[in-house]
């Protein structure tokens, strides 16, 4: 399905751009030794947020709430003091999303903390000669505090590694798409939320081409400053992402001019040995945090009209840190935990009554109760639960497994 060209937008959409936050009260969330940490941008104050479980891809909203992917494939939310404002939950991928789907990956919480964008992959078909399969990436969304249907907030196929532009727009990447010669297809697109039809196969009708850089055919991930005037994109290479390209942006999506006034390259940073992984701008856009070689570094970024001379020398922020996410919340909120006392454990799973419910309703009820449902593989969602184990009312740890057997729905019911 071809992406629509951007139609003219009401000027009021420009109000969605996020105002820059005041400097000096920021924090960087990241992963170190599989736990989530937060640090002041100068590294002087750091605190451990999570304990006892492996996490990946932390991102933080403006109020400092952190969302990360746990080793149980759930999305976990933490306050910076280690407490949890809501229980961890599975996305639709873990609630019977279908054969061949995997994820979530690269989860990113919106600035206002209400939504999470993430990458998924879908593998299907096996070539009888080569034994290879076709794998396609995509972007999906969920509410930040509970599971959302796969198409409720929109689903984009073909582009992945989402990054929020503002609370209603996300950019995503498809390395090499712009070199295919198809009109309207670019390496970087932006998606406008709020129009999704849950009955539609996808929401490409509200995804719009942004730009391709002919000199950088494989952009893989990126971040835009809160003012919308600076863009950092990691790209190139196959084993490692060997370059980090900094652009000036004169027209930020969703402004109609953004499609005709492409971002302009100001500086290209290269690291052929360690490459670049994650990037995140400071709230004022004057600094950039990135991961390279399994540690996090910060560089100052001045007037980009001066090119690479505006970029300062890298400063080590967190040795052994990965996946930085820079937000305006002060790290002092984490001082109560200080990395010592384990935080409060999340909500338990109180097993609901599932017998007699359709499989689809049983999955939803289990998710609301913070339980994991185990059903026969490839079962249709209209099958009915015949038995469940353990019984209703049993208390399990959050994410505890409930196993069900199924029967066909009786005729006339």
Image: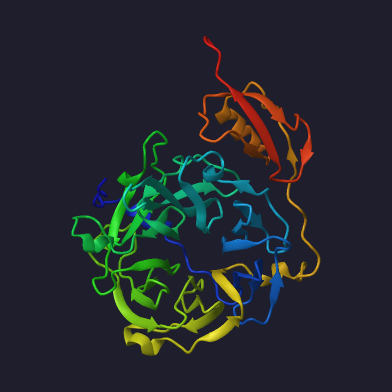
> What residue is rendered at 57% in x and 50% in y?
144
Most distant residue in the top direction: 412
Is 19 on the left-hand or right-hand side of 372? left
Q: Position of residue 346 (x, y in %)?
A: 73, 50
Most foreground residue, 413 or 111? 413
Q: Position of residue 190 (x, y in %)?
A: 35, 56
Most foreground residue, 339 or 179? 179
Badge count = 0
> What residue is rendered at 52% in x and 29% in y?
381
> What residue is rendered at 34% in x and 82% in y?
267
Most foreground residue, 132 or 334? 132
**Taking 359 as reference, is 184 above or below it?**
below
Q: Position of residue 193 (x, y in %)?
A: 41, 48
Q: Quadrant of the N terminus?
A: top left
**Taking 43 as reference, is 78 above or below it?**
above
Q: Is residue 64 visible?
A: no
> What residue is rendered at 40% in x and 33% in y?
199
Q: Is residue 175 visible?
A: yes
């Amino acid at each position: 399905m071809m992406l629509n060209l951007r139609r003219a937008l009401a000027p009021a959409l420009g109000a969605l751009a996020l105002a820059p936050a005041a400097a000096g009260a920021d924090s960087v969330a990241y992963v170190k030794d599989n736990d989530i940490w937060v640090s002041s941008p100068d590294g002087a104050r750091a605190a451990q947020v999570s304990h006892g479980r492996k996490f990946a891809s932390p991102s933080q909203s403006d109020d400092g709430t952190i969302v990360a992917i746990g080793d149980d494939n759930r999305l976990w939310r933490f306050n910076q003091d280690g407490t949890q404002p809501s229980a961890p939950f599975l996305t639709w991928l873990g609630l019977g999303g279908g054969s061949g789907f995997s994820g979530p990956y690269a989860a990113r919480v919106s600035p206002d903390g209400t939504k999470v964008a993430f990458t998924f992959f879908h593998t299907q078909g096996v070539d009888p000669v080569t034994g290879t399969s076709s794998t396609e990436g995509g972007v999906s969304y969920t509410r930040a505090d509970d599971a959302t249907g796969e198409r409720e907030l929109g689903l984009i196929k073909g582009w992945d590694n989402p990054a929020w532009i503002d609370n209603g727009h996300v950019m995503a990447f498809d390395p090499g798409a712009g070199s295919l010669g198809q009109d309207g297809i670019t390496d970087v697109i932006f998606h406008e939320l709020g129009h999704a039809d849950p009955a539609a196969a996808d929401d490409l009708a509200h995804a719009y081409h942004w730009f391709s850089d002919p000199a950088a055919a494989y952009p893989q991930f990126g971040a835009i400053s809160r003012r919308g005037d600076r863009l950092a994109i990691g790209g190139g290479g196959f084993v490692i992402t060997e370059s980090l390209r900094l652009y000036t942006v004169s027209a930020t999506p969703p402004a109609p001019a953004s499609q005709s006034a492409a971002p302009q390259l100001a500086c290209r940073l290269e690291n052929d040995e360690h490459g670049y992984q994650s990037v995140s701008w400071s709230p004022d856009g004057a600094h950039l945090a990135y991961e390279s070689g399994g540690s996090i570094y910060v560089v100052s970024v001045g007037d980009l009209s001066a090119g690479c001379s505006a970029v300062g020398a890298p400063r080590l922020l967190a040795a052994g840190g990965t996946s930085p996410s820079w937000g305006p919340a002060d790290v002092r909120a984490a001082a109560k935990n200080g990395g010592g006392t384990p935080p409060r454990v999340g909500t338990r799973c109180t097993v609901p009554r599932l017998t007699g419910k359709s499989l689809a309703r049983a999955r939803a009820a289990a998710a609301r109760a913070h339980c994991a449902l185990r059903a026969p593989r490839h079962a249709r969602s209209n099958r009915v639960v015949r038995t469940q184990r353990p019984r209703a009312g049993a208390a399990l740890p959050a994410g505890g497994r409930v196993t069900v057997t199924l029967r066909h729905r009786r005729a006339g019911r």
